[in-house]
Amino acid sequence: MLEEGQLIISTPEKWDALSCRWKQRKHVQQVSFSIVDELHLIGDKGGSVLEVIVSRMRYISSRVENKIRIVALSTSLANAKDLAMTKPMYTAIVQHAREGKPAIVFVPMRKHARLAALESFMERINEPVLKETLTCGVGYLHEGLSGTDQDIVKTLFETGWIQVCVISSKMCWGVPLSVHLVVVMGTQCHNGKKNVQSEYPHNLHDNFNAEVVVGVIQNKQGAAEYLTWTFMYRRLTQNPNYYNLQGVSHRHISDHLSELVEYTISELESSKCITVVDEVLLSPLNLGRIASYYYVSYTTIELFSSSLTSKTKLKGLLEILASASEYEQLPIRSGEEELIKRLVNHQRFTFGNPRYTDPYVKANVLLQAHFSRQMVGGNLASDQQEVFLSPSRVLQAMVDVISSNGWLNLALLAMEVTQMLTQGMWERDSRLLQLPHITKELAKKCQENPGKSIESVFDLLEMEEDERHELLQMSEAQLMDIARFCSWFPDIGLTYDVLDGSNVRAGNDVTLQATLERNLEGRTEVGPVFAPRYPKDKEEGWWLVVGDIKSNQLVAIKRVNLQRKSRINLDFTAPAEAGTRTFKLFHV
């Protein structure tokens, strides 16, 4: 993408993950023009990522001597006349609505979308729900509504059935509606009268870790110098009290940066992400490399390293996964505790004295509800999608942490959880539930099929066509969906050979060469995985694992992206003691 694209559009987090390895990615070094949108968010909780990527692009430009132009776009809030609150808003809306002209109201948060729509029409509302407000000619849109509800509101508005639409500010870019009046109600999200401050000091650890891993920061002095490229450094002298400075002299600032570096490095060293050599030089450790590679918080990696054991089961693994720092900001809304409590009471794994206001409990229960295919609605549905966006890379990081400890069974279990997440099912459920239109009842019927139990896609394909039709009892359209799924289902052959196997000796290096070959059945490419319960397109990903089942020891692992054919070498060391040992090759 970087090589072929002339224009790259990215979220701050994605560009942070890509650009942190700029030394290995020449195309990142060649970027000469960068546009940063919504820079006013730099003072919010996630604003440190914006600060990191802008600082890094400036730093890269200075090191590779390639000039870069950075254009930052920020919302202007200085003109108070352009702002309105409830009563002025209502007056303006009524004036335009009488003339048959539609209006849009943008509000800061989704809860304001509902409240603002109801307030002026309260005498005609029985319950604060969308269908009631629509009968009054007022609709509202926020990211918690289902896609169907959003489409209905947009259609009603465009056709003139409703005259007013109240929309949360987050949706302002995705609502292509034409109106005569637009009202921006409230500035609670950002106060333009206040100076924007840097949140970077609160998020130094992950950035420092990433820069140490790629070799940009090699010692403590280099870390202090790196800070001089940041927005935080510019703000130190402007607002020293905010950053706990005692003065603004060169000595005060230098001491402050040194203390900041010492504290951050000490924390990273305690979490075993980096090591300090001779009290000055910084070197990355395995956990730090994993955190940087998968763009995962160092606290999450530390949690995995300290909490996972060779005896951890699925319940414990899910609890640890849901306790990752990536879920710390999962919102708990007023009145939502009762909904979470009801969900908790209907899950496979119980909770010991759960706190229903704990974001980690919420993440856990939403994951379990997804595996059980329990429907959640409203805001919980949008939160559940947010929960899905992190586990893919977090789980891969977890697999690497487990593999580093050589725990075979737990590594295989974590890999299975990635498939559970993709397909929305438990590891004990029938594999047929991956197919479209297959319910749990139909899967059970297939397993109990007289003559031969049908438990896999290949079992279904081997049946005679009339027998398959009789068993499934589906319409032609549904059968076509299943046939389409089966034609795309991975059909991969695996062969292997131990190179120079006759000369393997105790304690020597061993190379196992595995060959994977896909049967594409006339197709030219591999499409995304069929995963209707996953919130976005999912590409295939495979692991090859070599392990000793008897001793629960993982000796080699490789992640594989397979198109048509691939040959992979897995290297490991033979046991120190001579004798017969059995190793198994897993393709997951």
Image (cartoon, helix red, strand yellow):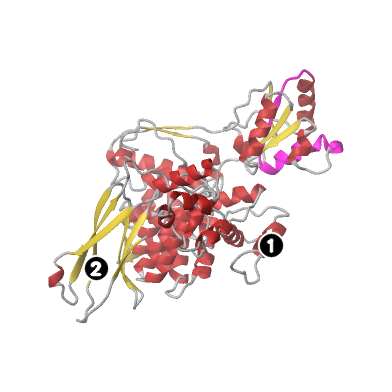
Q: Position of residue 218 (x, y in %)?
A: 31, 56
Residue 314 visible in the picture: yes
Identified at 56% across, 41% down, the residue is 196
Which amino acid is tagged 1?
Lys
User: Helix, strand, or loop for circle 2?
Assistant: strand
Residue receiving disc 2: 572
Does 93 appear in magenta? no
Q: Position of residue 444 (x, y in %)?
A: 54, 61
User: Helix, strand, or loop for circle 1?
Assistant: helix
**Left/right of residue 88 with respect to residue 429 in the rendered view:** right
Above or below for 16 versus 192 = below
Q: Nearer the viewer, residue 276 or 462?
A: 462
Q: Residue furthest right?
A: 123
Dot 2 or dot 1, earlier in sequence: 1
Identified at 39% across, 50% down, the residue is 540
Q: Nearer the viewer, residue 479 or 536?
A: 479
Q: Position of residue 258 (x, y in %)?
A: 41, 57
Identified at 34% across, 65% down, the residue is 275
Quadrant containing the C terminus is bottom left
Q: Nearer the viewer, residue 394 or 556?
A: 556
Above or below for 73 versus 252 = above
Residue receiving disc 1: 341
Span of residues in magenta: 99-124
Does 118 appear in magenta? yes
Identified at 66% across, 60% down, the residue is 343
Q: Quadrant of residue 67?
A: top left
Q: Nearer the viewer, residue 63 or 32?
A: 32
